[in-house]
């Protein structure tokens, strides 16, 4: 078990906190979803109650080591000030400039400072000014960041799979380090889901590509009692079983692997469920996320899809079959939508599954939802408040489910 914020004396200390404030902004640079900011409030309020001086470190977007004004964290400082009901100091331009370092040095107990976008520096991601990989440059940058505080708290779950200066490198240069309440909660739910799950344990996996979830499936086959596969990745599995999938998205180079995964599931007595029917169309505008008025949309009678049509959602037979499995589960792990849910006409399957997961949770099941699309789906279904845990990290949660060690966690000392 890693050290947590509760294990460390932070009273009146200068505390560096890595947070995930990579929030969406509109054309006017207004924050459109502040969930990632809100999720850090328990950690920040605890630190303020301990009269700590808080120095926040974060990134926004992909500026590729250059200062990009549209990716400044200034809007975040404004919103965080409102949420904390106190001023949040902010120095724009450069997170380790003379002005930033002075602001950190002058910070008093009970005050909050947000540093500018870490990724304005290529060293944050392990590169030199010229863009070449440079571990020494990353270490020097990590040391520079660490010099601004005494204690480091890792509370950015969404960045834990990155071995960056502010996630892993910084730890060796501070007096003490631990995980914040957000990361502690993520590790608790994801860890317990994988290692101490109440049975029956069900995994629901969707999304576009089998290749994105191969390692997840292989790891979960050792742990779950059943797997439901939907979304575009289901068509690769269906084709590998000799079922016609029309013009649906498919990864032909993964057909043999799909057969192997079926065999592993059978050998381990894991129920491997695929859609029994589909919503299909002959035309869809993916760019505008609309169904052209001339498009034909229909429901198949079984797993097969006619030539010229592509699968875009699961049908009612699939929903009813999956319903039985979901209702009997005691632990449910969901990553990835079961159709093109962002298009309303093709969202029913994903929304119905979200409602079923919420109903199972209401009756005592533990549910964990991860991945941006899955999170958006439970919100679209209006059941996000009824899910046991919604993960804040897409890539990090996927790598955790693969059984990989996350660099940002590995760097934190054990209790």
Image (spheres, rainbow, N blue to C red):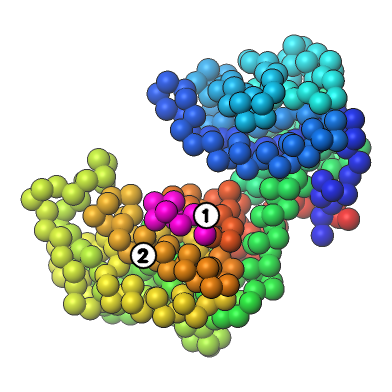
For residue 278, which numbered disc appears in the image? none
Q: Which segment is the magenta one?
A: 378-386
Residue at position x 65%, y 47% from top?
A: 157
Residue assigned mark 1: 385
Decide which of 208, 102 is in the foreground and name it.
102
* 266 lies left or right of 138: left
Mark 1, Cα crowd under 10 Å, few <14 / some 14-19 / many 20+, is few
User: Helix, strand, or loop for circle 1?
Assistant: helix
Report which quarter residue 119 is drawn in. Answer: top right
Residue ranking furthest to the left: 294
Residue at position x 63%, y 77% from top?
A: 198
For residue 352, which numbered disc appears in the image? 2
* 49 lies left or right of 198: right
Give the number of the mark in front: 2 or 1: 1
Callout 2 touching callout 1 (CB < 8 Å): no
Residue 249, x across and y down, in percent? 29, 60
Mark 2, Cα crowd under 10 Å, few <14 / some 14-19 / many 20+, is some
- Quadrant containing the C terminus is bottom right
Report which quarter residue 26 is drawn in. Answer: top left
Residue ranking furthest to the top: 99
Say if 109 sits above or below 302 in the image: above
Residue at position x 53%, y 60% from top?
A: 387
Report which quarter residue 355 is drawn in. Answer: bottom left
* 253 lies left or right of 244: right
**Closer to the N terminus: mark 2 or mark 1?**
2
* 22 lies left or right of 46: left
379 falls in the magenta region: yes
Residue 326, x across and y down, in percent? 46, 75
User: Helix, strand, or loop for circle 2?
Assistant: helix
Give me the C-alpha separation between circle 2 and circle 1: 16 Å
């Amino acid at each position: 078990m890693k050290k947590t914020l509760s294990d460390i004396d932070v009273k009146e200390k200068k505390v560096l906190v890595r947070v995930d404030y990579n929030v969406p902004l509109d054309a006017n640079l207004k924050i459109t979803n502040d969930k990632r900011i809100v999720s850090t409030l328990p950690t920040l309020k605890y630190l303020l109650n301990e009269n700590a001086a808080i120095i926040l470190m974060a990134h926004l977007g992909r500026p590729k080591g250059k200062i990009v004004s549209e990716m400044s964290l200034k809007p975040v400082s404004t919103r965080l000030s409102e949420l904390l009901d106190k001023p949040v100091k902010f120095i724009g331009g450069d997170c380790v400039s003379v002005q930033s370092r002075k602001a950190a040095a002058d910070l008093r107990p009970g005050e909050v400072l947000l540093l500018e976008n870490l990724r304005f520096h290529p060293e944050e991601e392990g590169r030199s000014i010229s863009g070449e990989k440079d571990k020494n440059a990353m270490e020097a940058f990590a040391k520079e960041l660490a010099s601004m505080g005494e204690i480091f708290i890792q509370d950015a779950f969404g960045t834990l799979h990155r071995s960056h200066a502010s996630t892993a490198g910084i730890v060796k240069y501070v007096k003490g380090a631990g995980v914040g309440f957000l990361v502690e909660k993520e590790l608790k739910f994801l860890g317990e889901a994988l290692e101490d799950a109440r049975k029956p344990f069900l995994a629901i996996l969707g999304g576009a590509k089998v290749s994105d979830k191969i390692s997840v499936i292989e790891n979960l086959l050792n742990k779950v009692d059943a797997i439901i596969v939907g979304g575009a990745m289901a068509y690769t599995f269906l084709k590998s079983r000799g079922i016609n999938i029309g013009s649906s998205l498919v990864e032909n180079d993964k057909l043999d692997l799909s057969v192997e995964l079926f065999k592993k599931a059978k050998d381990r007595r894991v129920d491997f469920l695929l859609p029994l029917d589909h919503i299909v169309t002959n035309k869809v505008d993916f760019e505008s996320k609309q169904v052209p008025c001339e498009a034909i949309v229909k429901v198949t009678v079984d797993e097969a899809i006619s030539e010229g049509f592509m699968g875009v959602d699961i049908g009612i037979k699939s929903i009813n079959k999956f319903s039985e499995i979901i209702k009997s589960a005691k632990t449910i792990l969901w990553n990835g939508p079961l159709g093109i849910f962002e298009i309303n006409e093709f969202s029913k399957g994903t929304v119905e599954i979200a409602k079923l997961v919420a109903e199972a949770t209401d009756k005592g099941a533990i549910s964990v939802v991860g991945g941006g699309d899955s999170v958006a789906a439970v919100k679209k279904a209006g059941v996000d408040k009824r899910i046991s845990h919604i993960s804040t990290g897409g890539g990090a949660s996927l790598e955790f489910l693969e059984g990989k060690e996350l660099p940002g966690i590995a760097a934190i000392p054990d209790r």
